[in-house]
Amino acid sequence: MDNLSLKNRDLSNIWHPCTQMKDHERLPLIPIKSAKGVYLEDFDGNKYIDAISSWWVNLFGHRNPYINQKIIEQLQSLEHVIFAGFTHEPIVRLSERLVKLTPKNLTKCFYADNGSSAIEVAIKMSFHYNKNRGKTKPYFVSLTNAYHGETIGALSLGDLGIYKESYKEILIKTIKTEVPIDKSDEASIEAANKLRKLFEKRANEISAFIVEPLVQCAGGMHMYSPLFLKLSYQLCKEFDIHFIADEIAVGFGRTGNMFAIQSADIEPDFMALSKGITGGYLPLSVVMLSQKIYDGFYCDYNLNKSFLHSHSYTGNALSCSAANAVLDIFENENIIEKNREKSEYINKKLQNFLNLENVESIRQTGMIAAITIKGYSATERIGLKIYEYGLKHGVLLRPLGNVIYFMPPYIITFEEIDKMMKVAFDGIKELLS
Ligand SMILES: *Cc1c(COP(=O)(O)O)cnc(C)c1O
């Protein structure tokens, strides 16, 4: 099987995600033959450091021996079973562990198989919970610059025009409030004051407020202070509005704590997890929720009050075995501590970027670092240029517009961090020449 024939066969039958397929007339697809650790390898023997964890899912490297082994073990007994009326050991164990790791009010797990579906579950449950207690509250509040996925409900909550604009006539009811403009406390206080004004006017029609805690990843790695989480959470309590923490991208250690909301010590009504949950192996998502929400649906036979939501692959046993393996690695290898060292190192290196005259700003939260480039118009597609430069030099960077970022697997070594950041530096510098 050679490279060229795979590319051509792919293009004759496949439409890729988040891609203008015509770009592939010029930009070749890259068939990957194998992967190991932080490296992807193509059919010509080129290796690429996966600096974006394959869209933020991969925590402990590709073909991780321990996760591989745990999935193989699971395959010997059960691959999947219908999750209505049946259960299995890996999911029971996973749920117990998640309940222990998350804030103590979160005692129930509702599973789905991707991030967007988890968001749909959370907003449907929030709305339905209110309806079950006699209140119809059809609006959801989300932040400017937010991203919560691509299905219609999740898309409606988002604020990124590129994904959303074409569908505006068919979206659900949402209200936008401003995200803090930066990591300062003043910015958080200002944004919270705006949220208060909104709640004062419209709380009786709002079911839930949803946030991406600390980092809006798809929105160009925009970062803000834990103070905003605290303040907005208090407002939600005060006005009887659910607080939904979308930890799909930031959960599982990415921001420096196991979950980003731990930085603010709050107890959200719902918390959505996916992406890193299986270490980048298999699709799985979960909505963690409080006993109070659960009890709002618990009753004698009454279909109107029941939550009749399901996905065919809900609670897949192989996915759960991967998720348990991921939690084992967190426990056994002191990952959160080790990440602190690595993120300090990344932070030191990040300062160098300020020496480039086309760099506007840098920022970092835990194992996410980002650089904003200035001085180019959108049609220059500098992100694409950096992407191509990175590939030529052995690093998979996938800029978000004019934001270059690093979100590597946690097993990346210090030498690999050096290489990843040097290639990005040289690529940004080359834009100047
Ligand atoms: C990726 C992402 C989603 C959507 O998850 P999918 O699995 O891609 O559907 C939702 N919210 C956030 C914050 C994300 O980063």
Image (spheres, rainbow, N blue to C red):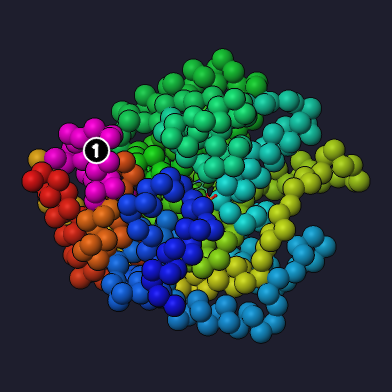
Magenta span of residues: 358-386
Q: Is residue 208 left or right of residue 350?
A: right
Q: Nearer the viewer, residue 51 or 321?
A: 51
User: Which residue is found at the position 17% from the left and 53% from the top?
Assistant: 427
Residue 64 in sight here: no
**Residue under label 1:** 380
Quadrant (top left/top right/bottom left/bottom right) for the N terminus = bottom left
CA neighbours of label 1 inside 10 A, class few (<14), some (14 to 19), many (20+): few
Looking at the rendering, which quadrant does residue 227 occupy? top left
Residue 113 in sight here: yes
The amino acid sitting under disc 1 is Glu
User: Which residue is found at the position 51% from the left and 52% from the top?
Assistant: 15
Q: Is residue 104 above or below residue 223?
A: below
User: Which residue is found at the position 74% from the left and 36% from the top?
Assistant: 128
Residue 362 on the magenta segment: yes
Residue 349 on the magenta segment: no
